[in-house]
């Protein structure tokens, strides 16, 4: 090595790690293991598959853009949270946190990078779902379908909001629990038990839209959310996302990373 | 902090301008878990240009001390600095300090090469750096392309050492790196550590393999029950301990410690 390059190397040795590089590393971690590739392949492939099935079997009157989007978002609403959970738990389940937090001692910065990486990946997946729906709608006339573009910008935004809240809720649960399997179980079971409690118990039904995120989100699906509906949603999001997110950030910041 | 007073067996001047003479300074470091004091006012220094062996029976507090040193565990009191700074204050720690605390703490679904490529990306080095290190630690291309879930412990140690060396650091902190290595592997590891120290680097090597440490270390820190029982240059310590060698010294020190625990 020449003196010049040696000197140059010494200068960048103590340059801080730029946030963009941290995000790039986290993005790569989401896609570089066999398990993560399978999950991603499933998430990416499901939208075109749903569109093809609809083109083959749906009633021609149902071949409209809002229906295509509605049917492609349904599996994403289930799968994206799993992506969010895995993004947050894998450092702890696989104990790679030992390496990650040694290279980047500021854990909140790592969390923010993971959050950004998973969100970027999630938005790309959502864009694919919308694009697949659009292709399906363009092909709808082949089956004498209506093919009408009846989804407003606001309506599309509501679908994006549903999917993003699912992804973020998954990340929040992953951070709060830190172990993959219990985090998955808790995410998929707890809100449903909660719904059952609040629908079957007299006197609790009135508060249900405030505290049940599934109920609070239902006017987003039907695209008829009101001012009161937004308030319900805000409170439900605080309970189901903000609370686990706060617990999660505190846990990740404080939990000791042990080797065994 | 008086970092200049440590005697370092390298000529001052050239080396001193490149590396601070004391790579690690641990001062009165303690960690309590409830009533249990896992690490009790531990103080020692790790000089540059030498291998420092960190010895102690299982549960003596070695790993907790190392975790505090690299910022993974907050100390209850006391402080630890690396090149004069708390580890967490290093802007890009991977370029200054190579750390291997547990070779098994790897994602089993990632290939060895990918583990190194990720590390290189994060600390700001080109992906070709991964291949350099794969060669340096004696993993074959085929092995590097396999998922780490299929690795033997010895291969994990080689991968872990490669990861620690990625950023061309001036300090290595290794916890039981010889675990799972065969005799040829242990011989090789000894050579790597000697070369590293010979080039002016500092090595802090935690182990319970006395013979291994005795062969490679210049300085020793022996801890038991969370406390430093003895520290100093190996020659000094062995001279003061009589003919029994390191094993005798170690057993005598840690047995006294065990008696203290009972009493």
Image (cartoon, coloured by chain):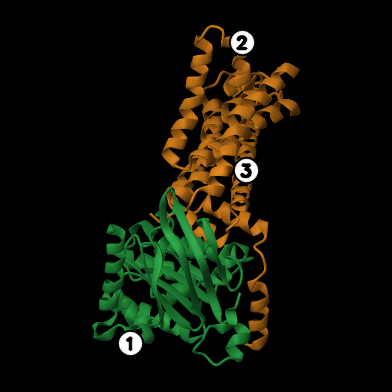
Chain colours: A orange, B green
Residue lying furthest front: B263
Q: Is residue B42 above or below residue B8?
A: above
Residue under circle 1?
Answer: B239
- Numbered disc in front, either 1 or 2: 1
Tell me the residue that label 3 is attached to: A119
The picture quadrant where one finds residue B144 is: bottom left
Q: Which chain letter goes with mark 1?
A: B
User: Which of marks 3 and 2 precedes in the sequence?
Assistant: 3
Q: Are marks 1 and 3 in contact (CB under 8 Å)?
A: no
Image coordinates of residue B58 in percent, x first then y, are 32, 62
Nearer to the camera, A206 or A38: A206
Disc 2 and disc 3 in contact, CB within 8 angstroms: no
Q: Which residue corresponds to mark 2? A: A206
Secondary structure under tag 1 reads helix
* Picture quarter with the C terminus of chain A: bottom left
Does residue A69 show up? no
Dots 1 and 3 on the same chain: no
Residue B167 placed where, x, y %? 55, 72
Residue drawn at x 44%, y 42% as measured from the top left: A179
Q: Quadrant of residue B18?
A: bottom right
Residue B233 drawn at (x, y percent): 41, 83
Decide: few, some or many residues near mark 1? Use Cα within 10 Å; few <14, some 14-19, many ≥20. Answer: few
Marks 2 and 1: in contact by CB < 8 Å? no
């Amino acid at each position: 090595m020449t003196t010049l390059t040696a000197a140059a190397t010494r200068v960048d040795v103590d340059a801080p790690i730029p946030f963009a590089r941290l995000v790039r590393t986290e993005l790569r971690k989401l896609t570089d293991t066999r398990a993560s590739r399978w999950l991603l392949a499933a998430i990416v492939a499901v939208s075109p598959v749903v569109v093809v099935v609809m083109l083959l079997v749906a009633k021609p009157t149902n071949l409209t853009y809002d229906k295509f989007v509605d049917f492609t978002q349904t599996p994403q609403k289930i799968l994206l949270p799993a992506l969010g959970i895995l993004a947050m738990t894998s450092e702890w389940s696989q104990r790679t946190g030992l390496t990650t937090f040694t290279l980047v001692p500021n854990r909140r910065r790592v969390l923010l990078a993971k959050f950004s990486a998973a969100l970027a990946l999630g938005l790309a997946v959502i864009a694919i779902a919308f694009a697949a729906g659009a292709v399906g709608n363009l092909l709808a006339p082949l089956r004498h379908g209506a093919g009408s573009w009846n989804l407003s910008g606001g309506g599309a935004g509501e679908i994006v909001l549903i999917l993003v809240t699912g992804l973020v809720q998954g990340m929040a649960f992953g951070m709060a629990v830190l172990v993959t399997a219990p985090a998955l179980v808790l995410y998929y079971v707890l809100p449903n038990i909660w719904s059952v409690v609040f629908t079957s118990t007299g006197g609790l039904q009135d508060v249900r839209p405030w505290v049940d995120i599934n109920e609070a989100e239902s006017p987003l699906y039907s695209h008829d959310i009101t001012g009161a509906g937004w308030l319900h949603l805000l409170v439900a999001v605080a309970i189901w996302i903000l609370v686990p997110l706060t617990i999660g950030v505190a846990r990740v910041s404080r939990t000791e990373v042990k080797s065994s | 902090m008086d970092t200049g007073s440590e005697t370092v067996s390298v000529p001052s001047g050239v080396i001193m301008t490149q590396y601070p003479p004391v790579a690690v300074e641990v001062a009165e470091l303690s960690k309590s878990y409830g009533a249990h004091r896992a690490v009790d006012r531990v103080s020692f220094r790790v000089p540059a240009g030498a291998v420092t062996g960190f010895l102690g029976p299982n549960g003596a507090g070695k790993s907790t001390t190392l975790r505090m040193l690299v910022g993974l565990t907050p100390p209850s009191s006391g402080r630890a600095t690396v090149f004069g700074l708390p580890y967490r204050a290093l802007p890009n720690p991977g370029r200054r300090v190579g750390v291997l605390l547990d070779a098994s703490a790897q994602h089993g679904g990632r290939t060895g090469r990918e583990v190194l490529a990720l590390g290189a990306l994060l600390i700001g080095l080109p992906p070709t750096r991964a291949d350099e290190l794969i060669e340096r630690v004696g993993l074959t291309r085929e092995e590097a392309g396999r998922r780490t879930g299929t690795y033997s412990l010895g291969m994990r140690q080689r991968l872990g050492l490669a990861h620690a060396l990625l950023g061309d650091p001036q300090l290595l902190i290794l916890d039981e790196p010889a675990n799972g290595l065969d005799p040829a592997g242990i011989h090789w590891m000894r050579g790597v550590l000697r070369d590293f120290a010979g080039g002016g680097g500092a090595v802090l090597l935690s182990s319970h393999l006395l013979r291994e440490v005795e062969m490679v270390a210049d300085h020793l820190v022996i801890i038991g029950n969370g406390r430093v029982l003895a520290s100093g240059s190996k020659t000094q310590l062995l001279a003061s301990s009589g003919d029994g060698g390191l094993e005798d010294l170690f057993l005598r020190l840690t047995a006294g410690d065990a008696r203290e625990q009972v009493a």
